[in-house]
Amino acid sequence: MTTQTSTHAPLPRLMLGDNQFFGVNHMSEERARAQLMRFQRDDAIADVLATACELGISTFMCTTHDRMAQVSDLVRADPARYPGISFQPCMPYAHKYANAVTEDGFLGAIKRFLPSDGLLGTTLRGAKSVATGDVDGLATLLVDAEMKMFEGLSTPVIWLQNVIVDLLVGLGMDDALAVFAAHVENKYGAQAGFITMNLPQTLDALDRAGVVNPVVCANINKAGFRMSGGIEAYQQALQQRPFRGVAMSIFASGAIPPREAISWICQQPNIESVVFGASSRASLTSTKELIDEYWVGPRPLGAQTAA
């Protein structure tokens, strides 16, 4: 397997996530329901993106939820409203495929999500992959299917969701991670990103796969919230392992006050970017101001970390 090395531009220090738009909150079901009701309309999501761009937060790390196709249409239709915006798709969105397979069968589901270019060739490639058990071919086909909705938009990083990353790591299918990295680099000129619930084990797998200096996103917060393996193992990885870290769940779903959470995360070594959820101008503004206050940039490997 060819070694993949990240040579792309630095990540933005702050990226907007999309959990709040689809009713995902790990601490409060009531708040999750309220958010889901608020963002029933696609233009409500687009309004938050426009506000974020106005404040200088122009990177949107989002799932490939069906509604992202409509949101992408809104952005394409009025680019001046979203200056400098880029999308960082996170795939696959498992529920979408499960529903499609139930309704249309496997090949029907693939055809539903095909990219517009090379319809016949892609269909034949999908049929061959099914017939021969070509897992790599199916994987790259599904990536292309997921990318259809982002045509014409900037997508500098394409992420593999933790549900797949952690499954592949657990099964020891390290080469599949390299296949993903090579495909998004060669076809889309993008960096491959890997989301995980177990940072140390995923870094081990990426090392074995030959993915050099990978972009990896994991829960990283002062409380150790949803950090499989424990906060000490994560801090050791941050201090000693060569990778480009993206921190999510820095507020531990509201358990850590914003200033305390951001002050702590900005002291950790090897953090290149933070992804967070926000749905109001006040929340977007306050988070950006705190990041600007405490950010010291990606700290080098071996940097001392405050307790």
Image (cartoon, rainbow, N blue to C red):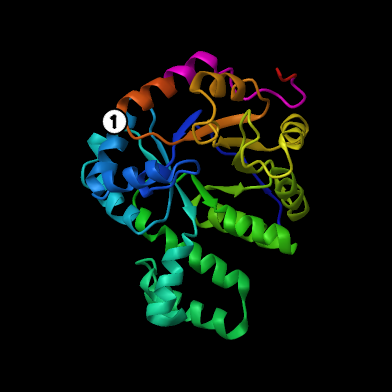
| Residue furthest front as drawn | 30
In the rendered image of this protein, does residue 100 appear above or below residue 256?
below
Q: Is residue 298 magenta?
A: yes
Q: Main secondary structure of the magenta part?
A: loop
Question: In this rendering, does residue 174 appear at all?
Answer: no
- The quadrant in which the C terminus is found is top right
Which residue is nearer to you in this view: 162 or 124?
162
Q: Secondary structure at mark 1?
A: helix
Residue 219, relative to residue 290: is it above or below?
below
Which residue is at 35% across, 59% downward? 66
Return the residue at label 1. Answer: 51
Q: Residue at coordinates 54% horizontally, 15% vertically from top-left?
A: 294
Q: Is residue 218 left or right of residue 205?
A: left
Q: Position of residue 1 (x, y in %)?
A: 72, 60
Residue 90 in the figure: left or right of residue 202: left
Residue 4 coordinates in the image, percent (x, y):
67, 50
